[in-house]
Image (cartoon, grey):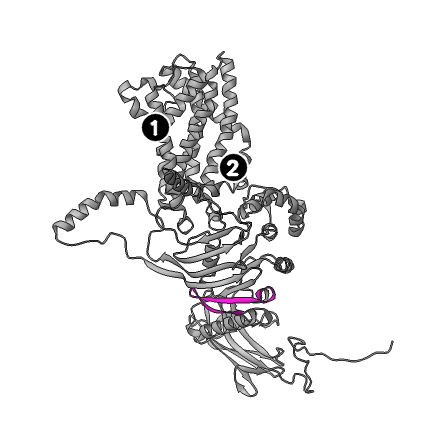
Amino acid sequence: MSDIAIRVEHLSKLYRIGPREPYKALRDTLTDVMYAPFRAASSFLSGRRSAVRNSPSNNYIWALRDVSFEVKRGEVVGVIGRNGAGKTTLLKILSRVTEPTEGYVEIRGRVGSLLEVGTGFHPELTGRENIYLSGIILGMKKSEIDKKFDEIVAFAEIEKFLDTPVKYYSSGMYVRLAFAVAAHLEPEILLVDEVLAVGDAAFQKKCLGKMGDVVKEGRTILFVSHNMAAISALCKRGFVLECGEIVFDGSIDSTISYYASLIENVNMTRTLRERSDREGTGILRFTNVLFRTPRGVTNTLLTGEPVSILVDYEADSTQVLRNVSISIPFYNYLGQSIFMCWTRMVGQDFEQIPPRGRIIAEIPKFPLREGKYYINLWCEVNGILADWIKEVAAINVIEGDFFNTGMVPPPGHGLIMVEHYFSYETM
Amino acid sequence: MVKVKGLLERWVFSSRQDESVPVFIIRPSKGLVALNMRELWQYPELLYILIWRDIRVRYKQTDIGAAWAVIQPFFTMVVFSLIFGQLAKIPSEGLPYPVFTYSALLPWQFFAKALTEASTSLVVNERVITKVYFPRLLVPTAVVLAGLLDFGIAFLILLGMMVFYGLTPSWLIVAIPLFLLLATITALGVSFWLSALDVEYRDVRYILPFLTQLWFFVTPVVYPSTIVPQAWRALYGLNPMVGVIEGFRWALLGSAPPDPRMLVVSSLVASLLFMSGLIYFRRMERTLADRI
């Protein structure tokens, strides 16, 4: 009984959305109240039962629907799901920032919520002052902050800027300081929402390391992130939220696989032409993508075989398109970017292409090893983003004979194949 | 009777067994929500730092910094003395007009800060309120209490002025903290109401300048309450600031004691404002993060 840190039973949260004035005006409410007797009188006289007030009918959305789960003390759980699935709402309710519409939650332990980076920071105050301000708002005691002050400053690497107002900090410095303060919170239960995606690569590595330390300290952690690599490194268990409901709860690896198949099913069965979740001016639009190998058009590729990526496109007018730059990045299912094909990188930006056509990227020897991968598509015309779609197509790669020697590294040794040659010299 | 007292205590303080590990139950609240005042005592450092932040930021933003706490009431007093004291010749109960009006300006400005700043404090702190849990009541409370510092600084000047005019305070000066308390209760009550209303009805903030001006005129800052006819005094006392200011002037300067009817009515209204404001605020607090 007492080793359950978080118990959630039938949690639901209803939000009102749709056509509405965002804020009520006191004068409107007052005039409503004043005219109410007149309205009642008129509807009474005309024999109509008018219970309808002037406000239009509102739409409702269940951000969370009948969510139930338990988290034991010391468990580190990853919560993944697409945008709008309800992850942040769940954390907000567990943080007591907002109330549930239905359900019951029992939390044993102090809760620290990292729902954003820089909670409580005030631009006019110095770094030193903000450390105290933010720390106390997040729930640390002043004595705690005194003890950890030097650690926090060292972690954020801002020793020289402690007494400068934070409004003069670069965004990198700001984010480092904010994370440094939050990372030194020591509650029994930690709720983290996407705050790992801050700073440059070196700092992200540091943050991940610090999170790893926190995990080792035995705290109960609920971790929301889109960074699958981080989640799988830190968590043992995970669940997937989709449209406000928990659709999967299990070990972190199977959770990530489930999530991967979820996005694949949703995103990649729609034709490329129909997809509306794209960014860019649309002066050029991708309409289809195919993979061609010596064996034919297929989504299953062999490591080492020549692969052509055929990208069909359409312009939004009959004009010829100039200065076109196209990129095709490849990702694994942890969301890690492995490599990309990019016209600008190989000095082959198209000076001019017809308004309708097919672009071909040829990879002489496909480098990826066995696994599932997916690609995005990105295009700039004359330096302005024209079309950018994520999770466009999925491919399965099967181990192939990259070196034509029949030899490949043992499983688990290497993610990609790299062309190389050996020779020797006498010394 | 004991039962009622117990129920009342539980409603106000929400006592719960304190384990070494705190347990929180989260569920949708229905009906009259427990005031849970106990919770507020668990955040003393937060209250302190919110007050500190208010003062620090305000003083950082003006080059003259702390001097502003003095300059504002002082120059207002000069202008009032010229116009109301000299030109309009408004009676000042036997006291030099500048002292008469300045001593009222102090509690008034303390209250006006609550009216204008505390009322919008929740919306101003929207970012923090939607990300971390703490009793939201601390937000307007911190703004009101921060005003005590300005009050304190300006009060020193008042003492200086009294010396200048050769006035000595009577033994009644011990009552000053009482009237200060009354002023604080009034300011808190008003700010609980207005800050909660401001989140729900965003046009409240536009009424504020108008409301402040109006309130100023029905408060005896530039005129003594003696100009109000006897029959109307109790009604006049409905403005809680009447009791505060007349009481403050009486305790500090030894002017004629205020009409007891006014004082009683003012105190009652102040307490009512405070209690009702507290209840309304706690009720509204539950859905605050969704509407802000």
The answer to whether marks 2 and 1 sit on the same chain is yes
Q: Is residue A99 left or right of residue A134?
A: left
**Residue B20 location (% of width, % of height):** 56, 49
Any magenta on residue A414? no
- SS at mark 1? loop
Q: CA distance from mark 2 to mark 1?
A: 27 Å
Q: Is residue A172 visible?
A: no
Chain under numbered label 1: B
Q: For the magenta stretch, what is the residue range?
A: A231-250
Q: Is residue B287 visible?
A: yes
Location of the C terminus of chain A by quadrant is bottom right
* Vertical comparison of A242 with B28: above or below: below
Q: Which mark is residue B51?
A: 2
The amino acid at mark 2 is Ile
Q: Quadrant of residue B88?
A: top left
Q: Is residue A393 left or right of residue B226?
A: right
Q: Which sits in the foreground, B162 or B59?
A: B162
Q: Which mark is residue A105?
A: none
The amino acid at mark 1 is Asn
Q: Residue at x 45, y 16 (%)?
A: B253
Q: Which mark is residue B239?
A: 1
Chain under numbered label 2: B
Any magenta on residue A241? yes
- SS at mark 2? helix
Q: Main secondary structure of the magenta part?
A: strand
Label 2: few (<14), some or many (≥20) within 10 Å?
many
Label 1: few (<14), some or many (≥20) within 10 Å?
many
Q: Residue furthest front?
A: B2
